């Protein structure tokens, strides 16, 4: 998708389709009123006829409007004039993309200059615009014999005032890069477990590095991980024929002296539960258990597209969790890279087992902060549904920052307490800790487990078990939390 800005008078702008907004009660934004006047009140007439009430998800297409250069006008409802939020504006954009596609249009001008969206500047509006339209382009095609029809829209132009132009341009670039990263994350997430293996993920990381000068990739084999003492990570893949891998992607946009932000992604390419086998229902969805890793990949893609002057390291702990004669058994004890021993009471609590060694490994980069992203607990889905990601941290400033970034990027996360009172639930008689904490507070005890490997740096954990993919008819990866991560990283 190509994005641009337009500062010419809307009536004078040639386009296949000029998109204009109308509020409920026939209230017109300035730009719409201006065009209405220019084209002989044809918009007022349509409103009077009651063809559109101005509610969100309503539209009317006007063919060959008079006296303006646009071939069509798409009138879209903006809802109530007061209290137009960025969330609602996003709904309008999504709906607009669908309508434009329905009419097979290849280009459009979004005629919303000066639209007053609550607490939102022109850069944010542009980010959101590019994000929505680039997301609308995504089609899953990897394992289909016939590709689904592509989005026809190729060029979107955003009408802005001359004063807004440079911020809007910057926003469009940022939003397009973020959505490109999201689409990448969605695609990796959607890819079935028999395609997307740890080895496949490692290959993708290497490929990304050959295409981008600012990126370096390193892949640690099982033998190399063994030498580092990563027996917790390795225990997860014991039952699988697919070798585990630790993937390290270094994005260098700044000098070597600049401390990096480190992202660590859970990359379980399929989670059967292992010997603690999961029930059959919806087990196919456990191909999405690498969506934390996918969000790290997506973020690296977005960084490569945008090239900000920062340093970011992406680490992916990749393994397949299978039952077999060689698989880890409940009660087995392993020694992690940190030296701490772990009693594996439930082989289905495998995410924390791969993450803990990856987090210990992260220390060598002397990170500014470390954020891990993981589809870690069913308990998180029970708590937050699919709206909000779980956020736990050993640092208040980092937690506050991620919380704010989530709100601003419309990719929200909500903090849960990482308090000492919960730590004792991980007690084991046979190791330094158990890998599960009992029946209650599952998201918190999982984070407590991780916190024992992150004492040397500022760390936050994002549990995306509910937000990483949609179920049902719209089953598929969402690309979250790439927007949240990019918002955080770009704030520096
Ligand atoms: N990948 C799952 C978590 C999950 C389950 C995410 C359902 C999304 C939907 C994770 O590896 C897991 O199995 N967690 C267990 C932990 C338990 C054994 C302590 C869980 O949440 O049931
Ligand atoms: Mn599991
Ligand atoms: Zn899992």
Image (cartoon, helix red, strand yellow):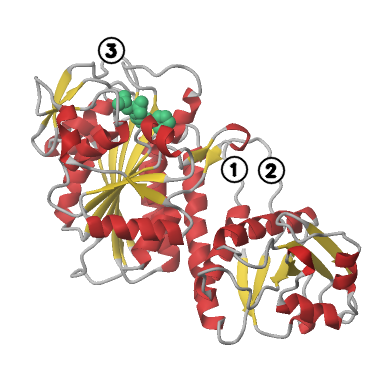
Helix, strand or loop at label 3? It is loop
Residue, disc 3: 325
Residue 134 is situated, as x and y percent measured from the top left of the image, at 59, 58
Residue, disc 1: 140
The residue carrying mark 3 has its beta carbon less than 8 Å from ligand 2: no
Residue visible at 89% across and 73% down? Answer: 42
Q: Are marks 2 and 1 in contact (CB under 8 Å)?
A: yes
- Nearer to us in this view, 144 or 35: 35
The residue carrying mark 1 has its beta carbon less than 8 Å from ligand 1: no
Q: CA distance from mark 3 to mark 1?
A: 36 Å
Task: Residue 347: name its quadrant.
Answer: top left
Residue, disc 2: 148
Residue 73 is situated, as x and y percent measured from the top left of the image, at 81, 69
Q: Is residue 327 above or below residue 490?
A: above
Crowding near pointer 1: few (<14 within 10 Å), some, many (20+)?
some
Q: Would you say 16 lies left or right of 126 here? A: right
Residue visible at 52% across and 57% down? Answer: 179
């Amino acid at each position: 998708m190509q994005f641009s800005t337009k500062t010419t008078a809307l009536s004078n702008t040639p386009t296949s389709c000029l998109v204009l907004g109308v509020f409920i009660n026939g209230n017109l934004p300035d730009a719409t009123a201006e065009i209405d006047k220019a084209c002989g009140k044809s918009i007022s007439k349509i409103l009077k006829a009651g063809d559109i009430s101005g509610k969100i998800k309503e539209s009317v297409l006007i063919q060959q409007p008079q006296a303006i250069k646009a071939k069509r006008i798409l009138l879209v409802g903006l809802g109530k004039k007061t209290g137009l939020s960025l969330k609602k504006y996003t709904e309008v954009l999504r709906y607009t993309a669908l309508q434009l596609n329905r009419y097979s249009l290849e280009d459009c001008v979004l005629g919303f200059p000066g639209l007053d969206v609550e607490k939102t500047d022109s850069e944010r509006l542009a980010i959101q615009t590019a994000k929505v339209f680039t997301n609308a382009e995504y089609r899953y095609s990897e394992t289909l014999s016939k590709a689904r029809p592509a989005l026809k829209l190729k060029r979107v132009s955003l009408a802005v005032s001359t004063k807004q132009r440079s911020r809007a341009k910057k926003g469009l670039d940022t939003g397009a890069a973020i959505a490109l990263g999201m689409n990448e994350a969605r695609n990796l997430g959607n890819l079935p477990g028999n395609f997307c293996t740890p080895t496949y993920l490692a290959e993708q990381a290497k490929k990304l590095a050959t295409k981008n000068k600012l990126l370096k990739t390193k892949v640690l084999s099982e033998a190399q991980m063994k030498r580092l003492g990563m027996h917790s990570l390795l225990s997860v893949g014991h039952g699988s024929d697919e070798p585990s891998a630790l993937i390290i992607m270094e994005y260098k946009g700044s000098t070597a002296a600049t401390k990096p932000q480190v992202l660590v992604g859970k990359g379980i390419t399929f989670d059967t539960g292992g010997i603690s086998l999961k029930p059959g229902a919806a087990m196919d969805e456990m191909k999405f258990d690498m969506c934390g890793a996918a969000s790290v990949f997506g973020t690296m893609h977005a960084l490569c597209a945008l090239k900000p002057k920062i340093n970011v390291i992406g680490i992916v702990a990749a393994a397949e969790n299978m039952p077999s004669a060689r698989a880890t058994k409940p009660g087995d004890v392993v020694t992690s890279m940190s030296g701490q021993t772990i009693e594996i009471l439930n082989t289905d609590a495998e995410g924390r087992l791969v993450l803990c060694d990856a987090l210990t490994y992260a220390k060598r980069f002397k990170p500014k902060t470390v954020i891990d992203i993981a589809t870690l607990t069913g308990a998180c889905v029970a708590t937050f549904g699919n709206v909000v990601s779980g956020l736990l941290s050993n640092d208040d400033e980092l937690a506050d920052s991620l919380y704010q970034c989530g709100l601003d990027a419309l990719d929200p996360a909500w903090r849960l307490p990482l308090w000492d009172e919960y730590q004792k639930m991980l007690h084991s008689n046979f190791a330094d800790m158990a890998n599960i904490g009992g029946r209650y507070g599952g998201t918190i005890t999982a984070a407590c487990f991780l916190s024992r490997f992150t004492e040397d740096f500022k760390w936050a954990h994002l549990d995306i078990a509910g937000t990483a993919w949609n179920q049902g008819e719209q089953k598929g990866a969402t690309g979250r939390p790439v927007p949240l991560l990019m918002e955080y990283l770009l704030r520096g």
